[in-house]
Amino acid sequence: MNTFKLKIITPEKIFYEGEAVQIIAKTAAGNVGILAGHTPYVANVVPSPLKISENGTDFRIAAVSSGIVKSENNIVTVVTTAVEWAEDIDVARAERSKERAERELAARASDKEFRHAEQRLKRALNRLTVSGKM
């Protein structure tokens, strides 16, 4: 199977660097699958599961926060504010984040505070979904 170089970067570290056969990411326009030889592409990534296949059949899943995905010259780069493997998600912490964000949304604060709480809720729900607890 044809592979491409995949790099997933956060502000703190290189989360993943290796060869992949396919990734599936959720963008603002919907899901996108990227295989070797994909045309040049750039899109915004939304909080969602990121599926990575190194062998073409099995997928490893990570929870990604907002960011971008770029494909060019058989190199795919995902730059995101946060990412973690499904098995590494602290479910109790994600539940607390979800509850806190829901309380903040219910408080109907300023528009800015509302948007921040909404983003935190999306991240928490994504983490819970990816962990299999939702």
Image (cartoon, helix red, strand yellow):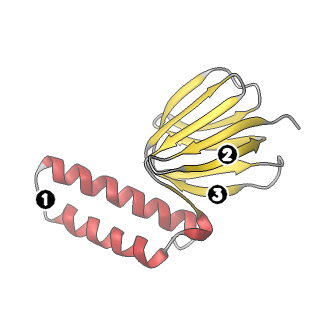
Q: How far across and how far down the image is residue 84, in percent?
A: 54, 60
Mark 1: secondary structure = loop
Q: Residues within 10 Å of mark 2 (few under 14, many from 20)?
A: few
Q: Secondary structure at mark 2?
A: strand
Q: Are marks 1 and 3 in contact (CB under 8 Å)?
A: no
Callout 2 amino acid: Glu
Q: Residue at x 77, y 31 (%)?
A: 36
Residue at the extreme bottom of the image, as rendered: 92
Q: How many marks?
A: 3
Q: Is residue 116 left or right of residue 20?
A: left
- Where, by quadrant of the figure, is residue 70 drawn? top right
The mark closer to the camera, 2 or 1, is 2
Tell me which label, 1 or 3, sits earlier in the chain: 3
Residue 62 image-quadrant placement: bottom right
Of marks 1 and 3, the one in the foreground: 3
Q: Which residue is mark 2?
A: 17
Question: Quadrant of the image for the N terminus?
Answer: top right
| Contact (Cβ within 8 Å) of mark 2 with mark 3 | no
Q: Residue 78 vs residue 105: left or right?
A: right
**Whole-percent x, y for residue 69 in the image:** 55, 35
Tag 3 residue? 61
Gap in Å between the C-alphas at discs 2 and 1?
41 Å
Q: Amino acid at mark 3?
A: Ile
Nearest to N terminus: mark 2 or mark 1 = 2
Q: CA distance from mark 2 to mark 3?
A: 15 Å
Find the residue positioned furthest to the left.
Answer: 110
Residue 86 x/y as whole percent: 60, 65
Task: Name which residue lies at 21% across and 61% down.
Answer: 105
Q: Are marks 2 and 1 in contact (CB under 8 Å)?
A: no
Q: Which residue is mark 1?
A: 108
